[in-house]
Image (spheres, grey):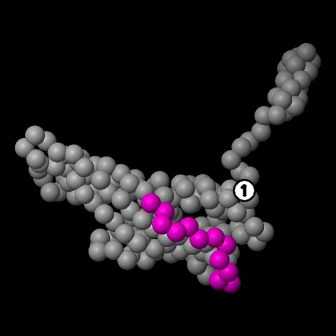
Amino acid sequence: MPFGKKILSIACCFLLWGCGYQLVGKKTHLPPGVDSIAIPTFKNRTLEPGIEISLTQSFLSEFIQDRRVKVVDRNEADSLLEGVVKSIATHSSSYDRSGQALEYQTIIVIDATLKKRNGDILWRERDLTEKMWFQTSPSAVVSEANKAAAIQQIGKSMAERIRNRFFYNF
C-alpha cells in the first residue's frame, strides 16, 4: 500500500475514534460480584399446565442471547432469578355477527425476584403483567396453537422487561 493511502487510512481511523463512535450495549449497572445468573423453572400457581416451562424458557433465551452475564447452574451462579406465574386469564375480545368469538385476549401476571447467592434480595418485581391477543379457529388444535404462541410472545416481552431491569435499573 502506498504511503499516502496508509496515512489516509490511519487518519480515518483516528477521526472515527475521535468522533465518539463506540460499541454500545455492553455497559451495565450490576452490583459488584454479579457476573452470572441461574434461572430455575418458575413456580406455577395457575391451573394452566406447562405455562411455567414456556415462561422459563423465554427468560433463559433472553439472557443467553444477551451474553452480558453468564447463565449457569444454580450451584455456580452469583445471582438467582426466580419467577412465580400468579395468574393467566383468557377471554374472548371480538365476535362475528353470529356471536362466535373471533379473537381472544390472554393476560399473564408473574412475580420475579433477583437474589444474590447468599439469599439477599437485590430486587423484586411484583405483578408484572402482559397481554396478547390471538385468533380463534373452528379447530381446537389451531386455537390452542395460537394461544401457545401468544403465551410464548408474552414470555418474550416479560423477559425483555426483566432483562432491562437486571442490567439498567439497580
Name the quadrant of the C terminus: bottom right
Q: Nearer the viewer, residue 42 or 4?
A: 42
Left or right of 61 in this view: 35: right
Three-letter code, disc 1: Thr
At a point 49% along the width and 70% down the height, the residue shown is 111
- Tell me, yes or no, whether the highlighted magenta stretch contains residue 86: no
Q: Is the magenta stretch mostly helix, strand or loop?
A: strand
| Horizontal and vertical percent position of residue 150 | 33, 53
Q: Which of 141 and 97 is in front in this view?
A: 97
Left or right of 88 in this view: 95: left
At a point 35% along the width and 51% down the height, the residue shown is 132
Q: What stretch is highlighted in magenta?
A: 118-129
| Horizontal and vertical percent position of residue 16 | 82, 28
Neighbourhood count class around disc 1 (C-alpha, 10 Å): few under 14, some 14–19, many 20 upward: some
| Horizontal and vertical percent position of residue 4 | 91, 15
- Dividing the picture into quarters, in which one does residue 6 lie? top right
- Tell me, yes or no, whether the highlighted magenta stretch contains residue 120: yes
Q: Which of 169 and 12 is in front in this view?
A: 169
| Horizontal and vertical percent position of residue 71 | 59, 67
Left or right of 129 in this view: 136: left
Which residue in the structure is indicated by mark 1?
28
Above/below status of 42 relative to 54: below
Name the quadrant of the N terminus: top right
Looking at the image, can residue 34 be seen?
yes
